[in-house]
């Protein structure tokens, strides 16, 4: 990662798949440093912008959350196709996280339990607009190639800041023990 | 009076054009909107679909109860403290019948009011302010917090620092800004040191001042264009929230009160321990999110809204002076009737942020927050219900725990779920008033999202489902190996 930096701002796309948005919150926990960051990067598709699809020339794709349904698969492929570097951010993206607790259960049983109403039977939502669920929740790297893994539930704002500023400066990101211990 | 569910279901969907807004942006979580139009751009159907399903209620069965307050806050990264505390309140019932020491209750309140402040600041400044400052159909590239920072650096900085302070209150009380561990069944695991108290206290007055500025900003926007602000997404509904035993606003604890669309009290001081007899959760095939309603009023009339607009108008007063002054002005603006225009949510939300900032200062000055008595004991039970006013509205957690300390049942009604029907009706109202008969542009479509954002939906909190269309999904890993396959036949049967 020692290539010279392009002159233009780097394009950064972010998304949350099967996650809780906590990693995006931690991203905002860089606090006032976000005002410095936007001098170096521009945000493309992201929950904080109204750009709905990645531009084809994104430099970084930052993804929180695992893969739990067909839509997640679709979005993940869009990010891989359009982003030069893909970062799996947080426990869910890296190993499925808490949503992967459902992997030991049969998805049909879960749905039947959640949508059962006393005396009125089970009505599982079944509209074609709703994406098909996968049997299991998968980490990102099982579906596409991932370039960097940023651990934590969520990683702290400081960890995200160190990671991004290393990357933006052309250094291989290193967090050290201080930013990846969780006790 | 038009029918409440007009535009929910088109008579001839196959013959219509489909427009989709996906993903709904500048909200938390995943949702999409579909709009069906005929050739003359007449709107026939509008639906807000919640497309995620994570199944928390099922997979926490079998977990030991003391894990639950930490586990379920992973429902949400924006309001983790609400889930952390609603689950803790339910588990308090299990371990001691719901008793807390004064220190524990005040630390939890401090944590919760910190969250209210950070979530409301985030929503107003980072997510919604671009629509309000630049216009609903302004340049899409500018409609974000970066655009706000370029055009109004002081406003953006104020938002960033208000949110930061709320996050710091959470960190100091729970150990971590997102997904902390401060609250435990029966109490808390830490109180504040003097240094921590002083660290937060030094900024408290500034936060109150900035919160007042924020109320002023939204109030000015509202009063500069009342025709828009009062009419946009104006859907009169029943309102529900917790109030304290004297009818005052309280985000941490209280009993349920509901008013009808004209402000008349429907029920009051109803213990939330009986929520399941009060509310029924409806299901529709096109959303994983359920549609709750007040059982006695029925599915067609019993839906309601929760959150800032409901809370501000449900309570009799706000216990802090500056926010109470603002509440009185808000109520006076509405005259004899409650305000139901969806943009009123923003005004109400900023009044609540001011209340949170004032309350945080009051709590920081209370010596109990540095107390040593953290846990209370009492008789063990097997069922617990915890309810709290989350930033987005009333949040219900209900658990049963067996003699082996294992969770055997869980039911959650999250704040956004309570607002599900109201949000859908609001977007249909906006579609009808702004899209009907027009060429559909990006800016017009953003009007739909503006209506959704008023409610500050937390779509991650909501659960999700499976269709009847024959479908097959194959998941192939990076090396081309098939790792999962899911099929569904036309009867909705799912298999490998």
Image (cartoon, coloured by chain):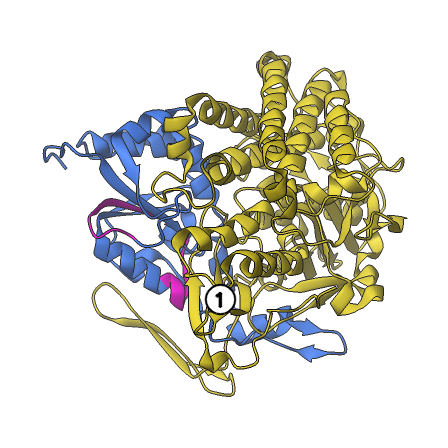
Report the magenta residues as a range.
Answer: A54-72
Q: Chain of mark 1?
A: B
Is B276 situated above or below B389? below
Task: Residue B147 in the image: state x and y as whole percent.
Answer: 38, 33
Quadrant occupied by the N terminus of chain B: bottom right
Q: Would residue A151 be seen by someone viewing this image from the given angle?
A: yes
Front-most of B236 and B118? B236
Find residue B105 and report its image quarter.
top right
> Dot 1, how many residues are within 10 Å of its Cα: few (below 14), some (14-19), or many (20+)?
many
Is B407 situated above or below B495? above
Front-most of B388 and B401? B388
Q: Would residue B88 be seen by someone viewing this image from the given angle?
A: no
Is A57 magenta? The answer is: yes
- The structure residue drawn at horizontal position 56% and vertical position 50%, both measured from the top left corner, is B451
- The structure residue drawn at horizontal position 41% and vertical position 61%, both measured from the top left corner, is B439
Is B84 situated above or below B6? above
Provide the letter of the chain coloured yellow: B
Provide the letter of the chain coloured blue: A
B492 sits left or right of B65 in the view: left
What kind of element bears circle 1?
Answer: strand
Which residue is label 1 attached to? B35
Front-most of B228 and A21? B228
């Amino acid at each position: 990662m020692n290539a010279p930096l392009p002159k233009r701002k780097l394009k950064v796309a972010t998304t949350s798949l099967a996650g809780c948005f906590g990693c995006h919150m931690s991203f905002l926990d860089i606090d006032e440093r976000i005002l410095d960051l936007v001098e170096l990067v521009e945000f493309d598709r992201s929950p904080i912008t109204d750009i709905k699809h990645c531009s084809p020339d994104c430099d970084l794709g930052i993804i929180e959350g695992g893969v739990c349904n067909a839509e997640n698969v679709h979005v993940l492929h869009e990010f891989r196709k359009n982003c030069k570097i893909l970062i799996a951010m947080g426990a869910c993206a890296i190993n499925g996280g808490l949503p992967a607790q459902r992997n030991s259960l049969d998805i049909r049983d879960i749905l039947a339990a959640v949508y059962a109403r006393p005396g009125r039977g089970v009505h599982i939502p079944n509209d074609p607009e709703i994406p098909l669920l996968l049997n299991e929740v998968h980490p990102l790297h099982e579906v596409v190639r991932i370039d960097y893994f940023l651990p934590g539930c969520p990683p702290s704002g400081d960890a995200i800041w160190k990671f991004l500023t290393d990357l933006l400066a052309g250094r291989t990101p290193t967090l050290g023990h201080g930013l990846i211990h969780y006790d | 009076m038009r029918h409440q569910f007009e535009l929910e279901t088109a008579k001839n969907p196959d013959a219509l054009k489909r427009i989709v807004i996906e993903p709904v942006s500048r909200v938390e979580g995943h949702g999409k909107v579909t709009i069906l139009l005929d050739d003359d751009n007449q709107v026939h159907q509008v639906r807000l679909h919640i497309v995620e399903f994570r199944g928390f209620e099922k997979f926490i069965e079998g977990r030991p109860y003391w894990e639950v307050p930490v586990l379920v806050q992973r429902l949400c990264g924006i309001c983790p403290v609400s889930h952390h505390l609603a689950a803790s309140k339910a588990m308090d019932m299990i371990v001691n019948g719901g008793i807390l020491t004064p220190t524990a209750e005040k630390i939890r309140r401090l944590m919760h009011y910190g969250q209210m402040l950070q979530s409301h600041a985030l929503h107003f400044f980072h997510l919604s302010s671009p629509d309000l400052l630049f216009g609903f159909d302004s340049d899409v590239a500018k409609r974000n917090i970066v655009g706000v920072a370029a055009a109004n650096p002081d406003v953006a900085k104020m938002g960033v620092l208000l949110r930061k302070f709320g996050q710091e209150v959470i960190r100091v009380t729970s150990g971590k800004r997102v997904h902390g561990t401060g609250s435990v069944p029966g109490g808390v695991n830490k109180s504040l040191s003097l240094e921590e108290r002083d660290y937060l206290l030094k900024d408290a007055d500034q936060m109150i001042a900035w919160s007042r500025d924020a109320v002023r900003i939204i109030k000015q926007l509202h009063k500069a264009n009342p025709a828009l602000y009062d009419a946009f997404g104006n859907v009169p509904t029943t309102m529900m929230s917790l109030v304290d035993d004297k009818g005052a606003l309280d985000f941490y604890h209280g009993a349920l009160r509901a008013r009808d669309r004209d402000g008349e009290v429907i029920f009051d001081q109803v213990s939330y321990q009986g929520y399941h007899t009060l509310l029924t959760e409806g299901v529709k095939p096109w959303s994983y999110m359920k549609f709750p309603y007040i059982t006695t009023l029925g599915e067609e009339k019993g839906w309601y809204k929760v959150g800032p607009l409901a809370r501000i108008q449900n309570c009799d007063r706000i216990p802090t002076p500056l926010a109470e002054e603002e509440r009185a002005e808000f109520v006076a603006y509405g005259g004899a009737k409650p305000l139901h225009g969806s943009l009123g949510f923003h005004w109400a939300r900023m009044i609540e942020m001011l209340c949170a900032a004032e309350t945080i200062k009051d709590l920081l000055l209370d010596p109990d927050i540095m107390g040593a008595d953290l846990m209370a004991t009492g008789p063990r039970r097997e069922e617990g219900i915890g309810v709290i006013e989350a930033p987005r509205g009333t949040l219900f957690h209900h658990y049963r725990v067996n003699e082996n300390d294992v969770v055997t049942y869980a039911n959650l009604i999250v704040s956004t779920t309570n607002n599900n029907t109201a949000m859908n009706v609001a977007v249909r109202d906006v579609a009808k008033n702004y899209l009907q008969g027009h060429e559909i542009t990006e800016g017009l479509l953003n009007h739909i999202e503006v209506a959704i954002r008023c409610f500050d939906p937390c779509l991650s909190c909501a659960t999700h489902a499976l269709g009847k269309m024959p479908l097959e999904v194959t998941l192939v890993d990076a090396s081309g190996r098939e790792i999962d396959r899911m099929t569904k036949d036309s009867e909705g049967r799912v298999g490998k």
